Image: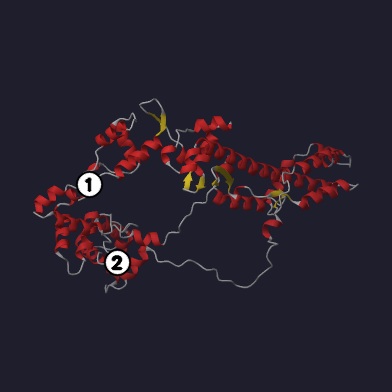
Amino acid sequence: MKLLQVPTANLEERIKEELEENPALEVTEDHEDGSGEELKDEFDSSAEEDYEEKDGSEDEYENLDISEYVNEYDDDVADYKLRDDNYPEDNEDRTMPHRVSTSFHELLLDQLGMLVVDDRTRKIAEQIVGSIDDDGYLRRETASIVDDLAFRQNIETSEEEIESLIKKIQQFDPPGVAARDLQECLLIQLNRKVNGTRSVELAIEVLEHYFDEFTKKHYDKIQRGLNITDDQLKDVINQIIKLNPKPGGDVSEVNQVESYVIPDFFINNNAGKLELSLNSKNAPDLRISEGYKEMLKEYDRGSKKDRRQKEAVLFIKQKIDAAKWFIDAIKQRQQTLYNTMHTIMDYQHDFFLTGDETTLRPMILKDIAERTGLDISTVSRVANSKFVQTEFGTYRLKFFFSESLSTDSGEEVSTREVKKILSDLIEGESKKKPLSDEKLTELLQEKGYNIARRTVAKYREQLNIPVARLRKEL
């Protein structure tokens, strides 16, 4: 189960760990049977029989607990863990390259260094900068900053002094930094615009006096309050939507390492026939070490088998059993993944041929579990952590699972289909007069879907689509 949950991107690292831990396991570039069955049979039929030979310590070996050997080897650091035979010894000092980047707070501290202030004021300013979050907002109360300085740095100050320094820090880049809320952040950016036009002045007035109305898109109230035309209101909106609501976010995102999705499966459409293949990293070629096989053969050929040799064979057997278990586990993982994905591909055959979401059939975990003979929890692990690449894009397997909804004709359709149609209706609506949830419900019912208004609202929220009023545009 643990191996099944490991993403393909991390499977290679997991195998590498096992290879380092178990010298009886190795990677082969050919496709020999690495299951270890033949070796295990050979061991069981010959070498294991030799343990019963009498050599003066029979009683000791009859009562031998193999676990004490396992523990003995686990406590000592094995030589193979400390030695790397793939690379020669190199005593040269090497400088490892490191990614150089400037964090958001380092950028602010660099600008703080350009302020001409004394040491006491600098410490206060550093405390303020340290209280700014990654989005660029100063969410800590001024009184709390005063207390922080008093208790932690023994610096007595006042809220007025703190506010004065905050105003200076708000002139730093990126524009809008050190604001206490969104309204202040946007106003800082507008006030920094050189040679502000009439639209900038109106935008400042809107944010100062009609911020709630603006966020709720009550544009008619703004027009009446400021006595402005539709064109002037459009200019105001254009000025505001160009501003950055998270001034610290741009710097933080630049320094983030991008993550990529590595698909576990590939589905190709070969002249109308779907072909499924596993990512090659899901099926590594592993086998029992040839060196360990040879050691067992030498032991079997020997006529005298003393205590030291038998101890070595016990260790070898333990490592071979562990290697065989891991190989079988990898094979079982490969088979489970393939069977599950193949069943999903057959179930959603039309989608993988066309890429049309409206062709998706209702499908739950139980449907796949019954067809594959797997436990529902196993199917769930596969669905939640694996990806499939198609000619229409890369999807998480969870995407293909959905509940059903009945139509007027009694046919069951996927809720994914309903969401797709709902999304298309909203995308094609007039932004000057967006469709309400009631109207969307009527349109879906006209298409034959038995759906309630509250269900439409739920699906709309799941699609991260706001209510009609917030979708309105001039």
Of helix, strand and loop, which one carries label 1?
Answer: loop
Mark number displayed over residue 323? none
Residue plotted at (81% across, 50% down): 295
In this orientation, does residue 50 appear? yes
Q: Which residue is mark 2?
A: 173
Residue 238 screen position, x and y as percent? 22, 58
Of helix, strand and loop, which one carries label 2?
Answer: loop
Q: Is residue 276 left or right of residue 357?
A: right
- Tell me whether circle 2 and circle 1 mark residues in contact (CB < 8 Å): no
Residue 428 screen position, x and y as percent? 29, 45
Mark number displayed over residue 472? 1
Which kind of residue does numbered mark 2 sit on? Asp
Q: Residues within 10 Å of mark 1 (few under 14, many from 20)?
A: some
Which kind of residue does numbered mark 1 sit on? Lys
Residue 220 screen position, x and y as percent? 13, 48
Q: Is residue 284 left or right of residue 54?
A: left
Q: Residues within 10 Å of mark 2 (few under 14, many from 20)?
A: few
Residue plotted at (9% across, 51% down): 225
Q: Is residue 342 left or right of residue 238?
A: right
Residue plotted at (49% across, 33% down): 365
> Given the current orientation, which residue lies at the most extreme front position?
271
On the rendered image, what quadrant is the N terminus found in?
Answer: top right
Badge nearest the viewer, 2 or 1: 1
Q: How many marks?
A: 2
Vertical relation: 376 (above or below) 300: above
Q: Nearer the viewer, residue 421 or 379?
A: 421
Sequence-earlier tag: 2 or 1: 2
Residue 166 screen position, x and y as percent? 24, 63
